[in-house]
Image (cartoon, rainbow, N blue to C red):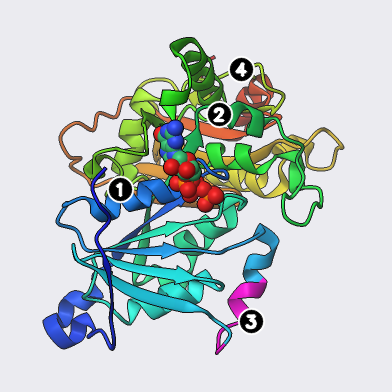
């Protein structure tokens, strides 16, 4: 591996406004790198920082801890408590190590606009990336200067199956985790791209099994096999995973139904396709989606005590019956966003049918199909 460039301290970095005026208004893409302890996240960042890719990347080595603490950390430690150190690398990248309050670090980072055009944020191995994604995806203040490009999960090919079967207990404070889904499973379920790292440590048979199990949980993510986290930078940055056109492409290729695999995680992918060429009443679909995401139950089950269906990630594409627009759906936990595709999609985007894909726990396809039919009048193809 190439040597990591040596670090030089920077002082009073000029903002882009000082140097280039209005360009400071452009949004900066942010990629979240997550993955369980020792999977190869830092190795990946070091690889990116030592490559000559022409990008000026700001890296935030974050110390976000347990998910429940994040809100607290956003409000405390805004002042002097924050430990933050900025360094500029020889290849133009910036590096920041933050002990606390990662959101504040991004805000501080934005004052150095002009020194970088990409942000990479590494979570700790024990963090549920869900709340971190929510912050960077939906936060109005940050949202005006930063946009979430993708969530990359680095998986340790040798140990990931073991981690996926761990008890759903917070590894830091040992309290039971919400909905009984452990951290490693959440990290895989929320990935837009999985780097299956340390493939040198397993044989082909084992690799097939691991890939099957990861695909069982999340069939809508791409997977790249790596050793020492080495991967061409263009394959992992600027993926635009939350973009409606990209969603369309992803749903064409990926996102088949998966049955529960051999692991007892009970988290898997369900894909519901509508008849070719059909359109859907947006209001009906959205009303159904809101109940499902917010109540963890189908509308007809809201007042019953059926087992909840917990959604970690959702994606979709459909044509609105009223406006004839093509719309993309993106959801992380309870939050979702519906955005239109451009009227003339870019080459390679072929829309043929509406589709919604859910990654979650306890999903019952038969019940989802009949519930969606009831709400929209359209029956998903079984
Ligand atoms: N054999 C092998 N070892 C690897 C590979 N990638 C990384 N490692 C080693 O695995 C160890 C952990 O890698 P890190 O990059 O520190 O992992 P991390 O995800 O940042 O770890 P935490 O910060 O503890 O969560 C280091 O000793 C790496 O050198 C690989 O592909 N194969």
Q: Which residue is mark 2?
A: 377
Q: Residues within 10 Å of mark 3 (few under 14, many from 20)?
A: few
Q: Outermost residue, right direction?
A: 305
Q: Residue at x 58, y 30 (%)?
A: 159
Point out the frontmost of discs 4 and 1: 1
Disc 4 vs disc 1: Cβ atoms closer than 8 Å?
Answer: no
Q: Residue at x 65, y 58 (%)?
A: 67
Label ID, residue 312: none
Q: Residue at x 27, y 49 (%)?
A: 238
Q: Which residue is mark 1?
A: 47
Q: Which residue is mark 3?
A: 76
Q: Which residues are magenta?
A: 72-80
- Name the foreground residue: 88 vs 122: 88
Please say if 220 is above or below 31: above
Point out the frontmost of discs 3 and 2: 3
Point out the frontmost of discs 4 and 3: 3
Which label's residue is closer to the chain start, 2 or 4? Answer: 4
Which label's residue is closer to the chain start, 4 or 3? Answer: 3
- Locate the C terminus and report the quarter of the image it occupies: top right
Please say if 177 is above or below 202: below
Which label's residue is closer to the chain start, 2 or 1? Answer: 1
Q: Confirm whether the magenta stretch covers residue 331.
A: no
Count of numbered labels shown in the rendering: 4
Q: Residues within 10 Å of mark 1 (few under 14, many from 20)?
A: many
Label 4: which secondary element: loop
Which label's residue is closer to the chain start, 4 or 1? Answer: 1
Left or right: 288 with respect to 94?
A: right
């Amino acid at each position: 591996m190439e040597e990591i460039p040596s670090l030089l301290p920077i002082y009073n970095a000029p903002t882009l406004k000082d140097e280039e005026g209005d360009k400071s208004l452009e949004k900066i893409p942010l990629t979240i790198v997550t993955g369980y302890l020792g999977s190869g996240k830092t190795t990946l960042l070091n690889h990116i920082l030592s490559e000559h890719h022409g990008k000026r990347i700001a890296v935030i080595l974050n110390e976000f801890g347990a998910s429940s603490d994040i809100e607290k950390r956003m409000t405390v430690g805004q002042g002097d408590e924050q430990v933050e150190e900025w360094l500029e690398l020889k290849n133009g990248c910036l590096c920041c190590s933050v002990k606390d309050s990662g959101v504040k670090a991004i805000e501080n980072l934005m004052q150095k606009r002009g020194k970088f055009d990409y942000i990479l944020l590494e979570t700790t191995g024990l963090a549920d990336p869900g709340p971190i994604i929510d912050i960077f995806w939906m936060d109005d203040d940050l949202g005006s200067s930063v946009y979430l490009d993708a969530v990359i999960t680095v998986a340790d090919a040798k140990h990931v199956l073991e981690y996926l079967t761990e008890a759903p207990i917070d590894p830091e404070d040992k309290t039971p985790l919400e909905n009984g889904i452990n951290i490693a499973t959440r990290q895989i379920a929320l990935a837009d791209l999985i780097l299956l790292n340390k493939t040198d440590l397993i044989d082909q048979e084992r690799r097939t099994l691991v890939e099957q199990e990861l695909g069982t949980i999340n069939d809508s993510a791409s997977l790249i096999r790596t050793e020492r986290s080495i991967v061409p930078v263009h394959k992992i940055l600027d993926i635009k995973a939350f973009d409606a056109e990209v969603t369309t492409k992803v749903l064409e290729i990926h996102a088949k139904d998966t049955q529960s695999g051999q692991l007892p995680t009970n988290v898997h992918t369900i894909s519901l396709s509508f008849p070719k060429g059909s359109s859907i009443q947006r209001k009906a679909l959205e009303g159904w989606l809101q109940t499902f995401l917010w109540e963890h139950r189908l509308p007809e089950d809201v007042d019953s005590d059926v087992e909840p269906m917990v959604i970690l990630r959702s994606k979709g594409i459909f044509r609105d019956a009223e406006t004839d627009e093509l719309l993309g759906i993106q959801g992380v936990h309870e939050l979702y966003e519906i955005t239109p595709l451009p009227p003339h999609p870019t080459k390679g985007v072929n829309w043929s049918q509406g589709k919604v894909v859910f990654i979650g726990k306890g999903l019952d396809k038969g019940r989802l199909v009949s519930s969606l039919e009831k709400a929209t009048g359209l029956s998903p193809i079984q």
